[in-house]
Image (cartoon, rainbow, N blue to C red):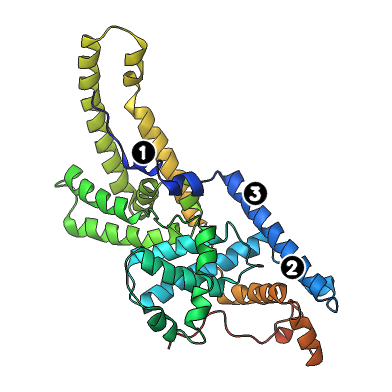
Amino acid sequence: MTQRVTFDELYRRSTQYRKWSFTRDELQQRRKTINEKGSLKVDERLKETPDVEPSQIEKVTVDEEQKLISFHSRRIIMLAKYFNMPSQVRATAISFLRKFYLVNSVMEYHPKLVLLTCLFLAAKSENFFISIASFSKRIPKTTPESILSLEFEILQSLQFTLFVHHPFRPLYGFFFDIQEALKGEVTAKELGKVYDNARNLINEAIISDAVYYYTPPQIALACLREVDEGLTMKYLEKKFKKEKSEEDIEVKEELQEKTEDEESKPKQENISDHYDILVKTITQCQEVIRTAQDPTKEEATVIDKKVQYCLNPSIVLKRKREGETPDANDPNKRQRTESVEPSLT
């Protein structure tokens, strides 16, 4: 029987799979370790600022880090649209940002600075040309130097793995395969609407942890099923039914030619087992996509203030000189800072 190499198998040979795929426990432990590393950096800064009491600085929790990273991941979408960048650039920039914070803490580097470098680096990586002068000029209070200064740090954190596999391409492939498999059962208009909605849902998927647990084709199928379960399940059932029939014929011919040895046993595996595993996998993937964090601007602002004190404890002294007492729980006494969502006009 002819052995076929699937998209999933190709993906599992990639550096993205080898370096950036985790179990849930591995990912949680990694984030906890990074948060502890950031906390130690804050302790070092406090030692250099003896006039500031440690009790005056509230460190950021693991959950707060993830909320702030998700908030700035969504800002990348807005910025990419502002620059008319294609979806591939946007998704790559989000991937860069989120991977960067699997190596570093927000208490070491503020996301509002890192995201700009990630977006510019993604544009270069995806061959979308824009000069650094033009890029920085259109973003208030930004200089080419401030963007480029973090570029090598980000590259190191990414382990120089700049090629990113996204679910967009497999989704495109499924779009055409569904047309062929369900010919006459679904109109081009209906399928086009499902495709567009699934493509939009991928924006949520790449902000969720699904990208660390599942392959791009699995995520694409999960998005399709989330948008139209009936259509997706009909497609999968038809595909597996057809494959089962073809495999039965091939296995029968194979067994007629060979003796009953160990080599022939794997070919007798039931294709329905693969179907059940796939459905279970994409169901779990759907659940993860639904958990993509979407903090409000107010939530992000509160966390942002805490991060700024962690990055620069001397701000406390400045507030004291101005007769203010920073209190993270009192919005009327928080430090007045530049908005976490800079104007693009």
Q: Gap in Å between the C-alphas at discs 3 and 1? A: 27 Å
Question: Viewer-nearest of labels 2 and 3?
Answer: 2
- The residue that label 3 is drawn on is 29
Which residue is farthest bottom?
Answer: 322
Q: Of marks 2 and 3, which one's residue comes earlier in the chain? A: 3
Locate residue 244, reporting x and y percent: 26, 27
- The residue that label 2 is drawn on is 42
- The residue that label 1 is drawn on is 9
Q: Residue at x 46, y 52 (%)?
A: 211
Locate residue 37, reporting x and y percent: 70, 59
The mark found on residue 282 in the picture is none
Specify the amino acid type for callout 3: Gln
Which quadrant, please, contains the C terminus? bottom left
Q: From where the camera sits, is residue 323 visible? A: no
Q: Local crowd at mark 3 within 10 Å, few (<14), some, or many (≥20)?
A: few
Above/below status of 219 relative to 201: above
Name the image quarter holding residue 270: top left
